[in-house]
Amino acid sequence: MASLLSKEDFNRFCKAAARPWFSNSRLAKIFGITPVQVMGLISRHGSAIDEYRRPTRIVPDAKERNCLMCRKEFTSEHPGNRICPQCKATAAWGTGEDYSAGGNGGWI
Ligand SMILES: [Zn+2]
């Protein structure tokens, strides 16, 4: 069977398939193949697609930031991480008074 996609299209396919918001039917439409062919490509080339997934993960943006509560500098893992570990451990954290306490889902 001839390959469904040119090498260039295949690379684009892997990139798109790595995005969680591209459904199989959307991928099929974009690349002019059927959803079944999309599923076949994904199952056969899962590792190639995973390569594209890696950089899209939340990259730790660690740097020194000042704690919003005690103002001490600490190593913050990402821009939303603005409370030092000591303050997080205090009772004040978790009362919902911090600006980012909502919707973070415990993502640290
Ligand atoms: Zn602090």
Image (spheres, rainbow, N blue to C red):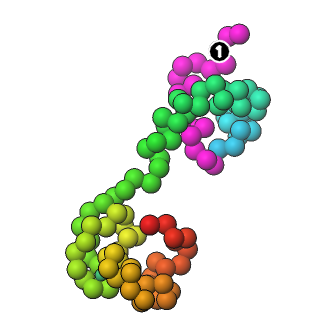
Viewer-proximal residue among 1 and 31: 1
Task: State yes or no: residue 98 in magenta.
Answer: no
Residue 7: quarter of image: top right
Viewer-proximal residue among 42 and 7: 42
Q: Is residue 32 visible?
A: no
The quadrant the C terminus occupies is bottom left
> In the rendered picture of this protein, how many numbered marks are placed on residues?
1
Placement of 69 over or under 20, stated as above or below: below
Placement of 84 over or under 25, stated as above or below: below
* Residue extending furthest toward the top: 1
Residue at 32 percent across and 85 percent down: it is 69
Task: State yes or no: residue 18 in magenta.
Answer: yes
Image coordinates of residue 92 in percent, x first then y, are 42, 89
> Which corner quadrant of the figure contains ligand 1?
bottom left
Residue at 27 percent across and 67 percent down: it is 75
Image coordinates of residue 103 in percent, x first then y, are 55, 74
Image coordinates of residue 102 in percent, x first then y, are 53, 78
- Relative placement, left or right, of 103 versus 38 is left
> Of helix, strand and loop, which one carries label 1?
loop
Residue at 58 percent across and 44 percent down: it is 19
Placement of 99 over or under 60, stated as above or below: below
Range drawn in magenta: 1-21
The quadrant the N terminus occupies is top right
Residue 62: quarter of image: bottom left
Image coordinates of residue 104 in percent, x first then y, are 52, 71
Q: Is residue 70 visible?
A: yes
Residue that label 1 marks = 3
Amino acid type assigned to the residue bearing label 1 in the image: Ser
Residue at 36 percent across and 67 percent down: it is 79
